[in-house]
Amino acid sequence: MKTINDKKIIILGAILLVFTIGYFVIINKVSYAFVNDYDPNKVYDETIDTIKKSAIAYGTNNPDLFQEEDTVYKKVQDLIDANLLVPNEEGNIVNPLKEEETLNDNVIKIKKEKDKITVEVDS
């Protein structure tokens, strides 16, 4: 009877060892999913891209902008006021490269050529 109990303890120990190793392997893999790889340059490019897309929407929804000229200059603040961009709590679009600066005063060049609208944002 003693050998049966000894075999049960050895089998339970082996199962516990396998589960423990599996636990540590899974935790090691999952923990890398939460690595913070914040890149200010990438965030800046995405912010400028969002501003450009919002300016295209602004130009598309306001065709009367181009009655006098094919090129219109607006500020980022104009897009915020038109509810096309969502600012932070203070009403600013923060520059990811320089946290103390905002992009609200950056000038946007909106140009309409035929039916196509192009946008340039000064950086």
Image: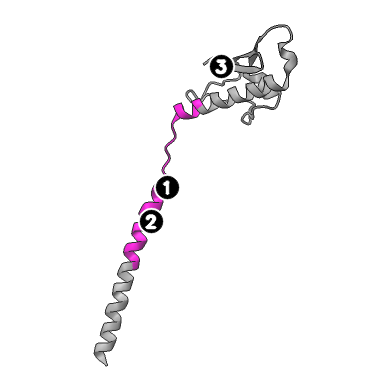
For disc 3, the neighbor class at 10 Å (few under 14, some 14 to 19, many from 20) is: some
Residue 30, x across and y down, in percent: 41, 52
| SS assignment for the magenta stretch, majority | helix
Magenta segment includes 22 = yes
Query: Within 10 angstroms of label 1, few (less than 14), some, or many (20 or more) residues?
Result: few
Quarter of the N terminus within the rendering? bottom left
Disc nearer the start of the sequence (1/3)? 1
Residue located beneath label 3 in the image: 121
Residue at x-position 33% and y-position 65%: 20
Foreground residue, 5 or 62? 62
- Image vertical order of residue 33 relative to residue 79, above or below: below
* Helix, strand or loop under label 2: helix
Q: What stretch is highlighted in magenta?
A: 19-45
Q: Tell me where residue 86 appears, x and y as whole percent.
A: 64, 30
| SS for dot 3 | strand
Q: What residue type is labelled 1?
A: Ala
Tag on residue 123? none
What distance separates the C-alpha of mark 1 from that of mark 2?
A: 10 Å
Give amino acid for label 3: Val
Residue at image location 38% in from the left, 56% down from the top: 27
Position of 40 with respect to 18 (left or right) is: right
Residue 14 in percent (x, y) is at: 29, 73
Q: Name the residue under label 1.
A: 33
Tag nearer the camera, 3 or 2: 3
At label 2, the amino acid type is Ile
View extreme (bottom): residue: 1
> Which tag, 3 or 2, sits closer to the chain's start?
2
Q: Name the residue under label 2.
A: 27
